[in-house]
Image: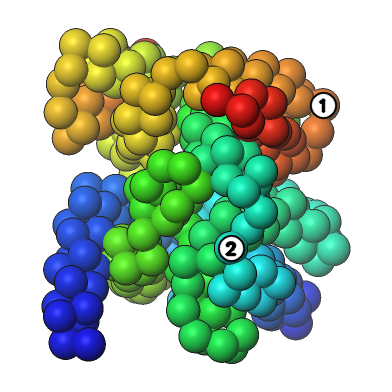
Amino acid sequence: MTALWITIVVVALASAAIRAFGPILVGGRELPPSMGAVIALLVPALLTALVLTQTFGEDGRLVLDEKAIGVAVAAVALSLRAPVLVAVTLAVATTALARAFG
Amino acid sequence: MSSEGERGGGVYLAGARAVLPLAMATGVMGISFGVVACSLGWGVVAPMVFSVIAFSGTAQFAVVSVLGGGGGVVPAIVAAVLLNARFLPMGIAAAPFLKGGPLRRALEGQTVVDASWAMASRGGGRFDREFMIGATIPQVALWIVGTVVGVLVGGVVGNVERLGLDVIFPAFYLTLLVEELRAGGQTIAVVLIAAALSLALVPFTPPGIPVIASCAAALLGLRGQSS
């Protein structure tokens, strides 16, 4: 039980420190202008990695399962200019159906 | 001052409203976390405390899977820290737009979570502080409520994965990514590089590393500054 509590407290402290690091280090200063373009591109870079690792990554392996079908349906819906809520709902419904009948 | 406050109030609400569909999924994932933690014999208090003081779904599920798989304290902590390391560049990016002295900035930095941060991006490296904080509050609140529900009545809810709700996260991030792609040009190149990097690294590195490594794709922004 103690091992669990040590893990919980250390993970919480580490998460807080990671999130506090940038704000304390940078403070209210403007980042150098050359960094502006890099920071702007961090958003698509991180989103791409989050989408792909959460869709295809599982325990350090690449997998192709019902989640990929759901995300693919969302991608098609978005390319047809479907609203966000419709695209996400279609993804969930597709994945749930694929899991039910797969 | 009051007009700024009103502006802020509206923007906080806008952030909260925009994130609501995802926040509901976060709540369901919280239930799932509570159920799984309970099934590992964590008791009632530990999962709840974990969600309150860490509020990080990815890190908490990593701890569950490492400890649940018979791993030790150190591998569990390392896995969680690697997964949360992405908040480092995200926090640096958002830092100039937070307010107050170091302590307050450190506290405001705690509101950096994936969806809020991405949704608060206003292009050109600017971030909307009020929108980000507003979007984080419902996610954290529902994550905690979900955990409590999962711990207390978990057995009734059963396996939430069957409902397909876990796919909400990549699907929702995809909708944010599509918005970003409208910028065209360099963004498309960055997305392709980040995609190649993250997929190539998944089989060879611990979870979390592929996401951090994909940040390197953003360095493309150093080129073509003249434009």
- On what subunit does the disc labeled 1 rest? B
Q: Which residue is mark 1?
A: B204
* Residue located 49% across and 85% down the image: B100
Q: Secondary structure at mark 1?
A: loop
Dot 2: element: loop
CA neighbours of label 1 inside 10 A, class few (<14), some (14 to 19), many (20+): few
Mark 2 falls within which chain?
A
The one nearer the camera, B80 or B73, is B80
From what the image shows, is residue B168 above or below residue B25?
Answer: above
Q: Quadrant of the C terminus of chain A?
A: top left
Q: Position of residue B169 (x, y in %)?
A: 39, 39
User: Does residue B21 appear to the left or right of B144 in the view shown?
Assistant: left
Q: Is residue A38 above or below residue A68?
A: below
Figure check: B100 above or below B175: below
Going by the numbered disc 2, the residue's amino acid type is Glu
Count neighbours of disc 2 (C-alpha within 10 A) and say few if under 14, some if 14 to 19, many if 20 or more: few
Q: Nearer the viewer, residue B80 or B227?
A: B227
Q: Quadrant of the N terminus of chain A?
A: bottom right
Q: CA distance from mark 2 to mark 1?
A: 37 Å
The image shows residue B111 at horizontal and vertical percentages of: 46, 68
Q: Is residue A10 visible?
A: yes
Give left or right: position of B35 versus B192: left
Q: Which residue is mark 2?
A: A30
**How many marks do you count on the picture?**
2
Give the residue at x 76% y 25%: B201
The three-letter code of the residue at mark 1 reads Phe
Going by the image, does B28 lie left or right of B97? left
Rendering coords of residue B20 (x, y %) = 21, 54
Residue at 39 percent across and 25 percent down: it is B183
Q: Position of residue B25 (x, y in %)?
A: 30, 49
Q: Is residue A84 left or right of residue B85?
A: left
